[in-house]
Amino acid sequence: LGADPARIVARTGPSVCGRCYEVPEAMRDEVAAVEPDAAAETSWGTPAVDVAAGVRAQLVRLGVRDVEDAGICTLESRDHYSYRRDRTTGRLAGYVWLDAESSRGAAPGSPAGKSS
């Protein structure tokens, strides 16, 4: 869509964290070959993947400056669905939107019609 990455606001939602997302060592190594920041170790010392860290690193590398992580681990939080924790299926949802004013030149959060 031709967006200026410096004007993108990115938020990652709840996800299993790198302290809990245990994976086989070969899988972690494959992920790390693509995104080194995603390589992690669980709190009990086994290979893991930190999806949020990997996403953040990719966004920053692409020039997105306003990146925040929800900081909620779905395995640790009883308020969020986790198949790894409960062994039952469930659903999470996410969304993306384009602010019409921002797409016309106004900086995110600035008054409509005024470019920064």
Image: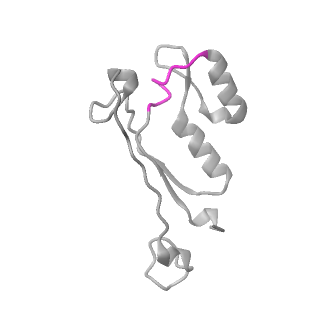
Quick check: can you spot residue 116? Answer: no
Q: Name the one closer to the observer, 4 or 116.
A: 4
Task: Give coordinates of residue 112: x percent, y percent.
Answer: 44, 82
Residue 17 part of the magenta segment: yes
Residue reaching furthest to the left: 79
Q: Is residue 1 magenta?
A: no
Q: Position of residue 7 (x, y in %)?
A: 57, 66
In the picture, measured across the screen, residue 49 lies left or right of residue 110, that is right
Q: Position of residue 97 (x, y in %)?
A: 47, 63
Asked whether residue 32 is in view, the answer is yes
Considering the whole magenta stretch, tell me its main secondary structure.
loop
Residue pictured at 68% horizontal, 23% vertical: 29
- Residue at left 38%, top 26%? 83
| Residue located at (60% from left, 33% from top) | 38
Which of the pair 43/34 is nearer the observer? Answer: 34
Image-based side of 23 in relation to 11, left or right = right
* Residue plotted at (50% across, 85% down): 114
The answer to which image quadrant residue 72 occupies is top left
> How many dots with numbers?
0
Q: Which residues are magenta?
A: 16-24
Q: Quadrant of residue 36?
A: top right
Which of the image's four quarters has the N terminus? bottom right
The residue furthest right is 33
In this rendering, would 38 be left or right of 83? right
Above-or-below relation of 34 to 30: below
Rendered position, 90 above or below 6: above
Up/down of 89 relative to 67, above or below = above
Going by the picture, which residue comes out furthest to the bottom?
A: 113
The quadrant of the image that shows the C terminus is bottom right
Q: With 88 as the anchor, is 43 left or right in this view?
A: right
